[in-house]
Image (cartoon, rainbow, N blue to C red):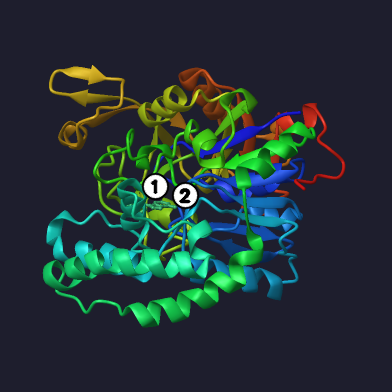
Amino acid sequence: MANIVIVGTQWGDEGKGKIVDLLAENADAVVRFQGGNNAGHTMVVDGEQFISHLIPSGILQKKICIIGNGLVVDPKVLIEEINYLKQKDITVTPKNFIISDRAQVIMPYHKLIDTGRENLKADKKIGTTGRGIGPCYEDKAARTGIRFVEFTNETGFAEKLKAVLAEKNFYIEKFLKLTPPVFEEIFAEYSEYAKILAPYIADASAAINKLIKNGGQILLEGAQGIHLDIDHGTYPYVTSSNTVAGSACAGAGIGPKYIDEVIGIVKTYTTRVGAGPFPTELFDKTGDFIQKKGAEFGATTGRRRRCGWLDLVVLNNAVKLNGLTGLAITKLDVLGELKSLMICTGYKYKNGIIKDFPADGKVLEKCQPVYEEMPGWNEDIALIDKYDNLPQNTKNYLKRIEELSEIPIYIISVGPQRDRTIVLNNPFLNISGIKTPSFT
Ligand code: IMP
C-alpha cells in the first residue's frame, strides 16, 4: 500500500494533470486537497482533450474522486463540470465522486470582490484568476464562510447568507462602488445548486481514512505550484492556500503517517501567469519559441504564460519545502530544437551568490540568474518511449537535474498523450492496492 502526494514545484501549470491521470491508473482514489477552480488540467486521452478545474483527473480512470475539506468550490462551475463529463460518457455519481461537507462554497460576492479589488489596484494587480478564491479563503479564516454542510441545509444556508451578505454588500457598495447582489436572487439560484450537489456531500476525511484502512492507495493531487503557496511563495503574488505537500494532510483530513511518497512535477522550463518576480524569465526569441512550442496558455483564463529557463533555486526550494522523494519531468520534448539550454543554479545578488530562495520580493526582483549552459539535443524526442533510446545530451540534461536537486527522476513526459511517457519508477506498482475500493 502506498499513498502519494503530487505537487507542482514551480508556479503552477507544470503538467500535473497528465501525471495524476497516469498514476491514477494504479490508485484507488484521487483526492484534491486545496485551491479551487483557479486550477485547470488539460489531459489528452485517445486523442480527445479533457479540461477539468475541480474534479480530479482520476475520474477519467474511473477512480473514486474526492474534493477535500481544504478546497473552495464554486457550485455552479462544479455542476457544469459534472454535466460536461457526463456528456462525454464519464461516470460521475455519489459512488465515485464526493465533496467534503467541510469544503467552503464560493459565492457570487466572492467573485465580485476578487475582480472588483483587482480593478482598483491599477499597477499593483496580483493577476488573480478572478474566480473568488482569495475572498472565499478570507471568509474561511474569518469564520464567516459557508461550508457545504450549511449550504445543503436550507435554513442554515438562509441564515448564514443573510448575515454575511449585510457585511459584504456594505463593502461592495461603499468601497468597491459596485452593485451589491440581492439576497433573494442568490438564495433562489444557489438553493437549486445545493439540491443538485447534495447527494455528493459526505465526510471526505472519513471516506479517505476508510479507504486507507481497507488497503487502498490514495493519490493526493495538489493544485497550483509551491511558489504560489500563501506562506512559502512569492508573497503577495501568491494564491490563498498552502500548496505544499504538508497541506495534503490538513486539506484531506488524514494523518502524516499515511504519506509514503511526495512527487514533485518539474516542467523542463519555467512558466508563470499573473504578476510577480520570476528571475529566469526570458524576454527574447527563445522565450517566444518556448511559449509557442509549449502552447503556454492558461487552461483556466487563457492568459499567455510568461516563460523562462529551468531554475534550480526554485526546484531546490520545492525539494526542501515538500520533502520530495521523486521528480516527474514534463514537456521535455518542447526543448528539442534548442541548440543550448540554460539551467539556473543560483542568483547573483549584490556581491554574492544566493542559493536559497529569498523571502523578500524586492530582493528576488533584483536577483540575476547564474546559468550553467548545456548542449541541446536538436532532435524530436516525442516518440521515444525508453530512457535508453533518448539522445545522450538529453540524458546528460536529466542527470544534471538529478545531481543538482539530489532527487531521483521517476517519470519523464515527452508529449501530452498518456503514452508519451517514460516511467522509470511508479511507486504504486511496487505494491498493489485493493481490488474493489469502497469508502462505504
Ligand atoms: P488566485 O488563485 O486566483 O487568487 O490567483 C493568485 C495567483 O495565483 C495569480 O498569479 C494566478 O495567476 C495564480 N494562479 C492561481 N491558480 C493557478 C494555476 O492553477 N496555475 C498557475 N497559476 C495560478
Residue closer to the observer: 210 or 272: 210
- Mark with earlier residue (1, 2): 2
Amino acid type shown at disc 1? Thr
Residue under label 1: 271
- Name the amino acid type tagged 2: Asp
Residue at (19, 31) in percent of width and height = 360
In the image, the residue with mark 2 has its CB under 8 Å from the nearest atom of ligand 1: yes
Where is residue 365 shown, x and y percent of the image?
19, 37
The residue located at (27%, 46%) in the rendering is 237
Disc 1 element: strand
- Residue 263 in view here: yes
Q: Residue furthest right?
A: 435
Residue 399, image quadrant: top right
Q: Which one is in front in this view, the residue at disc 1 or the one at disc 2? A: 2
Task: Check the picture and name the quadrant holding the N terminus.
Answer: top right
User: Quadrant of residue 429 in the image?
Assistant: top right
